[in-house]
C-alpha cells in the first residue's frame, strides 16, 4: 500500500470527497511541506510551533498517538491567505479544506517522520516521490507536465491531467532514452541517478507555485509579489489576523505592528499581575484610564477612542471564541475589576466581503459574545453595551485580497461614562 493511501481514503470517506479531490488536497499539503521558499519541512513544522502547538507537533513526530488539532488551529498555523489559495485551487469549500487538513496534517507528518526525525530535502523527496509518481504516471511525465497535471487534479479532472502528463511523459521518456544512448554501458543509469531527483525537485517547485497561487514561471514583478506574500505570512505568524487595527481616529492604530510579540508582566493598581503584549490593548487601556483625557472626557469625546483586541479571535464564520482568546478576556476582566468605576462598550466589525445584512448580524453577535463572556467572568455591570457595525466602517474594497481586507475585521472596546 502506498504511503498516503490511508490518508486519502480517510479524508474521502469522512468528508464525502472523490479520490481525486482528496488527493489534490493532499498534494496541496505536500507542496506546503516541501516548499523551500518557506523553509521546507522544518519551516512547515515551525508554523505550528509558533501557533502554540509545540507539544502537539512533537506527538506527531515521536512515537505514540498523534494529538489531534482543530480546523481553527490549522488556519491559525497555516495562515488564512494560504487557506484561501488552497480553497481556490481545489474547488472545495473553506470548512472542508480546514477540517480535512486538520485530519491530514498529523498523519502526514507522522508518516514522514517514522524515526522521530524531520527528514532532509533528499530524504523528503524519496518519501513523497512514490505519491507524486502514482498521481502523474511516469516520473518524467509528472515533472514535465507538473503544473498542468496539478491543476487538473485540483479541479477534479484528474483523468485529463493524467492523459496530458502521459503525453508529455512519452516525450520526456524519449528524451531521457536519447541521453542514455549517448553514454556507453551503464552510463545512462548514472545520469538518471542524479537526473530523477532534479526532476522531482522541479515538480515540487511547480506544485508549490501552483497551490500557493503564484502562477507558473515567475517574472521579476511576480517575485516582488512573492516577497509581499511572505511578508503577509510573517504578519499572520505574529497573530495580527482577524483583529488588525483599522478605523480613522482609532488611537491604537499601530498596536498590532509592535515589533516584539513577547508577553511581559503588567501590574495593575490593585496588585493584580497580567501577562500581556507591550503596546497591546491592555497596556493602552490602563494608560488611557489613568490619563486626564479620560478623566475629563465625556461620552462625546470618548466615542472615537476605540481599542482593538490584538489576541482575540473567533472560529471562522461563527460567534464562538477560540480557546486562545481566554488570556486576553481574563486580562480585560482583571482591568475592569481593578477600576470598578470604568464602563466599556464592545464593538464588532467586518470587512466588505459578503452580504451587508449578514455581516452586520455576525459582527453584532460576536460583540455580544464578548459581552457575555465578560458578564460570565463577573464584570457584566461594567459592560452595559455591545454593538456590531458590520462593514459600516470598512476601508478596504471588497475586491481586494483577503490579506488586505483583514484590517477591517476586528473586535474593539471603547470607554463610556
Image (spheres, rainbow, N blue to C red):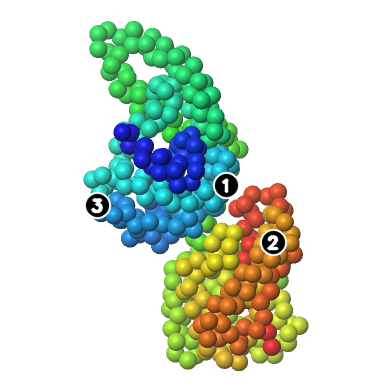
Q: Quadrant of residue 372?
A: bottom right
Q: Earlier in the sequence, mark 2 or mark 3?
A: 3
364 w.r.t. 297: above or below: above
- The local crowd at label 3, few if under 14, some if 14 to 19, many if 20 or more residues have their Cα within 10 Å, is few
On residue 296, the disc is none
Picture coordinates of residue 403, whole percent (x, y): 60, 53
355 w.r.t. 322: above or below: above
Label 2 sits on residue: 359
406 w.r.t. 110: above or below: below
Label 1 sits on residue: 93
Q: Earlier in the sequence, mark 3 or mark 1?
A: 3
Which quadrant of the figure contains the N terminus?
top left
Q: Earlier in the sequence, mark 1 or mark 2?
A: 1
Picture coordinates of residue 73, whole percent (x, y): 46, 58
Mark 1 lies on a secondary structure that is loop
Q: Quadrant of residue 183?
A: top left
Answer yes or no: is residue 36 visible.
no
257 w.r.t. 3: above or below: below
Q: Nearer the viewer, mark 3 or mark 1?
A: 1
- The local crowd at label 1, few if under 14, some if 14 to 19, many if 20 or more residues have their Cα within 10 Å, is few
Q: Residue at x 69, y 88 (%)?
A: 417
Q: Quadrant of residue 315?
A: bottom right
On residue 63, the disc is 3
Amino acid at each position: 500500500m502506498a504511503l498516503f493511501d490511508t490518508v486519502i481514503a480517510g479524508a474521502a470517506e469522512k468528508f464525502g470527497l472523490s479520490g481525486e479531490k482528496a488527493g489534490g488536497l493532499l498534494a496541496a499539503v505536500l507542496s506546503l511541506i516541501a516548499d523551500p521558499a518557506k523553509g521546507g519541512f522544518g519551516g512547515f513544522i515551525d508554523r505550528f510551533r509558533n501557533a502554540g502547538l509545540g507539544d502537539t507537533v512533537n506527538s506527531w513526530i515521536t512515537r505514540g498517538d498523534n494529538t489531534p488539532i482543530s480546523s481553527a488551529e490549522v488556519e491559525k498555523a497555516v495562515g488564512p491567505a494560504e487557506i484561501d489559495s488552497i480553497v481556490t485551487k481545489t474547488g472545495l469549500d473553506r470548512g472542508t479544506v480546514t477540517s480535512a487538513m486538520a485530519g491530514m496534517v498529523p498523519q502526514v507528518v507522522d508518516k514522514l517522520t517514522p524515526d522521530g526525525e524531520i527528514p532532509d530535502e533528499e530524504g523528503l523527496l524519496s518519501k513523497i516521490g512514490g505519491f507524486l509518481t502514482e498521481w502523474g504516471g511516469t516520473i518524467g511525465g509528472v515533472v514535465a507536465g507538473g503544473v498542468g497535471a496539478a491543476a487538473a487534479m485540483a479541479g477534479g479532472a484528474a483523468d485529463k491531467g493524467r492523459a496530458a502528463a502521459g503525453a508529455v511523459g512519452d516525450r520526456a521518456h524519449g528524451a531521457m532514452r536519447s541521453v542514455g544512448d549517448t553514454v556507453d554501458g551503464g552510463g545512462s543509469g548514472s545520469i538518471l541517478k542524479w537526473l530523477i531527483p532534479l526532476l522531482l525537485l522541479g515538480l515540487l517547485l511547480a506544485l508549490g507555485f501552483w497551490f500557493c497561487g503564484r502562477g507558473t514561471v515567475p517574472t521579476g514583478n511576480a517575485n516582488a509579489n512573492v516577497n509581499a506574500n511572505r511578508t503577509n505570512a510573517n504578519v499572520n505568524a505574529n497573530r495580527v489576523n482577524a483583529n488588525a487595527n483599522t478605523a480613522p481616529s482609532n488611537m491604537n492604530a499601530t498596536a498590532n505592528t509592535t515589533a516584539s510579540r513577547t508577553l511581559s508582566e503588567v501590574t495593575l493598581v490593585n496588585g493584580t499581575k497580567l501577562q500581556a503584549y507591550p503596546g497591546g490593548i491592555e497596556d493602552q487601556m490602563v494608560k488611557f484610564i489613568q490619563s486626564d483625557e479620560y478623566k475629563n472626557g465625556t461620552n462625546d469625546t470618548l466615542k472615537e477612542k476605540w481599542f482593538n483586541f490584538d489576541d482575540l479571535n473567533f472560529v471562522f464564520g461563527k460567534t464562538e471564541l477560540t480557546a486562545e482568546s481566554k488570556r486576553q478576556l481574563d486580562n480585560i476582566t482583571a482591568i475592569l475589576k481593578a477600576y470598578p468605576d470604568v464602563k466599556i462598550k464592545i464593538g464588532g466589525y467586518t470587512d466588505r466581503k459578503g452580504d451587508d445584512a449578514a455581516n452586520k448580524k455576525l459582527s453584532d453577535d460576536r460583540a455580544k459574545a464578548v459581552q457575555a463572556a465578560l458578564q460570565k467572568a463577573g464584570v457584566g455591570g461594567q459592560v452595559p453595551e455591545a454593538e456590531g457595525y458590520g462593514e459600516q466602517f470598512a476601508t478596504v474594497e471588497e475586491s481586494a485580497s483577503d490579506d488586505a481586507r483583514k484590517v477591517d475585521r476586528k473586535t474593539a472596546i471603547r470607554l463610556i461614562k
